[in-house]
Image (spheres, helix red, strand yellow):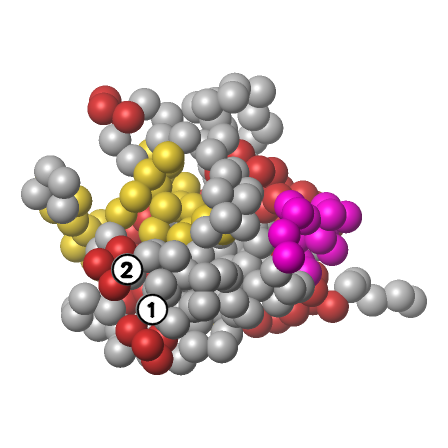
Amino acid sequence: MSLEPTPRRTVSESMVEIPAGKILLRDEGTNTGWKAEVAAFRLAPYPVTRELYRAVLGEAPASPAGPRTPVTDVSWLEAVRFCNLLSRETGLDPCYSASDDPDGQDVVCDPEAGGYRLPSEAEWEYACRAGNSAVRYGELDEIAWYRGNSGGGVRDVGTRAPNAWGLHDMIGNVWEWCWDVYDPEVYGPYRVFRGGSWSDRPHGCRASCRRKSHPAFRVDDLGFRLARSL
């Protein structure tokens, strides 16, 4: 009997169980805040790598970066499709409905389906903080690849110190797509991404920092991380 390729096995076996809790989120642009309850869930310890992305899809976006770096130049829509494909290939029910809308507004998520998905924004920040209320969960040079130490490019996952729950690269290396719409009344279908990247100054590498873009947007410092409901 043949085994699944190593990258597929690894993502399933290494996911970290995040306990239930509450989080206060804040939008600095509008100076508003809101509370969210977070059910227990699982989160990958690293962003999706080029190695895993290629193992599932057969190819990854062109880049000189190595196989253990986070995959970048992937849109929100492509991240959602990847989650569904990985779910099917590993015998799980997909969480997302198919999308024909270029804005992704017809995508529906059933988090209880059991497959892979993007974390919600509340799940992301709650997991990033890991019980820490500071600007970030450690000293920036120790926990993150950012403009001051990255050398001008994405770096291998898991090579900076993790947070208290064993999650690496939550700050820096690449921004990470979340499920949520940013502000539909102002920005329409734009989705949230979090965490800062290799190209950001310290101000962008904070647990509370929120950014957004169109679901078809791709750039070389934006990737994603996998979540699953318990």
Vertical position of residue 132 compared to residue 194: above or below: below
Q: Quadrant of residue 207?
A: bottom left
Whether residue 59 is in magenta: the answer is yes
Q: What number of labels is visible?
A: 2
Vertical position of residue 39 compared to residue 111: above or below: below
Say what secondary structure mark 2 lies in.
loop
Q: Which mark is residue 148?
A: 1
Vertical position of residue 133 compared to residue 59: above or below: below
The residue singled out by tag 2 in the image is 201
Residue sitting at x 59%, y 28%:
98
- Give residue 39's position: percent from left, percent from top: 34, 56
Vertical position of residue 203 compared to residue 96: above or below: below
- Give residue 33's position: percent from left, percent from top: 12, 46
Residue sitting at x 52%, y 19%:
101
Q: Quadrant of residue 185?
A: top left
Give the residues in magenta.
51-64
Whether residue 147 is in magenta: the answer is no
Using the rendered image of the protein, determine whether residue 92 is visible from the camera's viewpoint.
Answer: no
Q: Is residue 72 left or right of residue 105?
A: right
Q: Quadrant of residue 195?
A: bottom left
**Badge 2: how crowded within 10 Å, few (<14), some, or many (20+)?**
few
Name the residue furthest top: 101
Q: Nearer the viewer, residue 59 or 127?
A: 59
Q: Give the amino acid type for the residue marked by disc 2 in the picture.
A: Arg
